[in-house]
Amino acid sequence: MVLFVRRFLALLATVGLIGSVCVYAASFAGLTIGSVTNAHLWLFIFFGGIFLLYIPVIVIEYNGPSWGREFFWKGFAETRPQWTVTTIKGLGIFALLHFVLFLVLTHGCSPEIVNGAFVLNDHGTIRRVLDQTEYLSLKGWETRFFGSFMIFFYTVLPLYWWFPSARQKSGSIQRLRKLFIRARGSELP
């Protein structure tokens, strides 16, 4: 049962990862957050999925006040293949580079359409007027920025669930089981 739950959560996270890679790749073909019908709904689903899939990780791994930054670098890496940690570090750098590049290209402003004009908007102050090509380019970078972070977060999750840690193997997964029992009010099969 525990193996099934772990694999199911890994597969759910993998679906999010595939969707994130598709969003990132489509941004080079002109996809922008504003060009998608119900874009805010899709962003909510993608980002909401990240948070929902991290809840079981926190329930299993939380060790009280001593739980801190060293969990990822020590606890996560202790029983997983080295390539998983290297991949996550590389994707973290990849996402941070997209963040910095987006900030540099937009000067910390948001590309928007205000009164029919393409502008860089800084909390209501128009910093610069753009032509349509610049606007679409910056909106593409905005989409790549979000996509790169979704790729990063959705990569950690399947690796966490597919390669169980010593804590998961030794019975800490029972915390998650107890949480489900409390929520359902009965024992799981």
Image (cartoon, grey):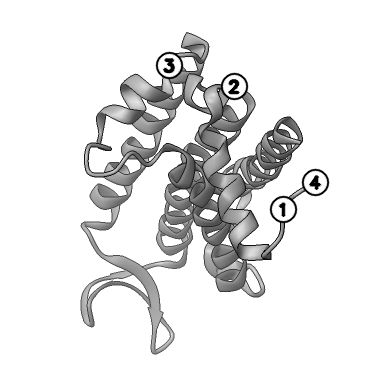
Outermost right residue: 189
Amino acid type at mark 1: Glu
CA gap, disc 2 and disc 4:
24 Å
* Disc with the residue nearer the chain's start (2 vs 3): 3
* Disc with the residue nearer the chain's start (2 vs 4): 2
| Circle 1 Cα neighbour tier, 10 Å, few/some/many (<14 / 14–19 / ≥20) | few
Outermost front residue: 186
Residue 163 visible, this orientation: yes
Horizontal arrangement in the rendering, residue 44 relative to residue 36 (left or right): left
Q: Which residue is mark 1?
A: 187
Q: Residue at x 38, y 32 (%)?
A: 92
Q: Which residue is mark 4?
A: 189
Amino acid type at mark 2: Phe
Quadrant in which residue 117 is drawn: bottom left
Q: Residue at x 55, y 72 (%)?
A: 40
| Circle 4 Cα neighbour tier, 10 Å, few/some/many (<14 / 14–19 / ≥20) | few
Q: Which residue is mark 3?
A: 86
